Image (cartoon, rainbow, N blue to C red):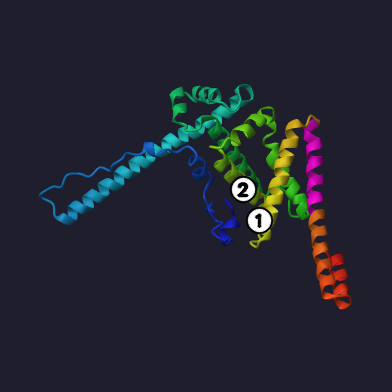
Amino acid sequence: MFRSVARLPLGTAFFRRGVSHASRRVSFFSSATTQQAFPYFPLPNPSQSQAEQNVGAGNAETSDRQKRNAKGGDYENEQARLLQAALRHVLKLGWTEEALIAGARDIGVSPAIVGSFPRKEAILVEYFMDECLQRLIDKVDSGDLPLTNLILSDRLAKLIRVRLEMQAPYISKWPQALSIQAQPMNLPTSFKQRAMLIDEIWHAAGEHSTDMDWYVKRTVLGGLYSTTELYMITDRSPEFLDTWTFLNRRIKDAFEFQKTFREASYLVEAVGAGVGSSLQGFVQRVFQR
């Protein structure tokens, strides 16, 4: 993801653009242990030339690598199916190892596979976060979200709401998910996933700038998203109406603050340049915003 970050300076593009959802997802639980330590090399045949032996060894190595990759892919697909099945048990069992075991039984595999997950509870939350991000991207790319005729603040509010509504079925267990994400060993992945989400929201809203405002805008939007997420946990209004009202107000406040900041900057510029034409230009610029 990180569609616009790839164009940023200062080595900021540490998440490569264009990585598919599937490969990003399996990166959280794929294991090098599914691959053999050494490739298979056949013994040389005295009747073959050296070139033929090299070609044969190369073909055998390629074939063996393909088999290993196929096995690794099947194993990762099985893990993904398990995680998907485990989500059905989260409401009852929470984001726990027990939910993973129940998911394994649902798809007919040994619960022992759960032992292959390095961070059992965290991996389930991270899988869910990745799935939600992909669903949001699919909605945007398919045109299901009518964003074109909305102003920027309304586009941002709609995108955040659509994403948070995906958590609504799990809202009673979401405090546990936040607690898992906040654990030191899980923070790097949690930060990465949220940063990818915020960048995707800005990109979908039509913001593609790569200047220093890039950092400020994403920091502000990340704060808006997180505060709305926390508000949603305590919201008991029908269909989270209070949450969406809270979100709209916070976004409006953020845009008003941005306008006020610009006006203050122009005022300082005008005062510094003196009265007269500079002040006239300042007034014109303020009322053009």
Q: Amino acid at mark 1?
A: Tyr
Where residue 42 appears, as percent x and y from the top left, is 20, 44
**First in sequence: mark 2 vs mark 1:** 2
- Secondary structure beneath label 2: helix
Q: Nearer the viewer, mark 2 or mark 1?
A: 1
Where residue 135 appears, as percent x and y from the top left, is 62, 42
Image vertical order of residue 258 relative to residue 266, above or below:
above
Where residue 208 appears, as percent x and y from the top left, is 66, 59
Where residue 37 appears, as percent x and y from the top left, is 31, 40
As measured in the structure, the alpha-carbon distance from the residue carrying label 2 to the one carrying label 1 is: 11 Å
Quadrant location of the C terminus? bottom right
Residue at the (58%, 41%) spot, across then down: 190
Image vertical order of residue 90 relative to residue 2, above or below:
above
The residue identified by callout 2 is 195
Residue 69 visible in image: yes
Residue 70 got which mark?
none
Residue at the (69%, 27%) spot, across then down: 172
The residue identified by callout 1 is 215
Looking at the rendering, the stretch of residues picked out in magenta corresponds to 238-255
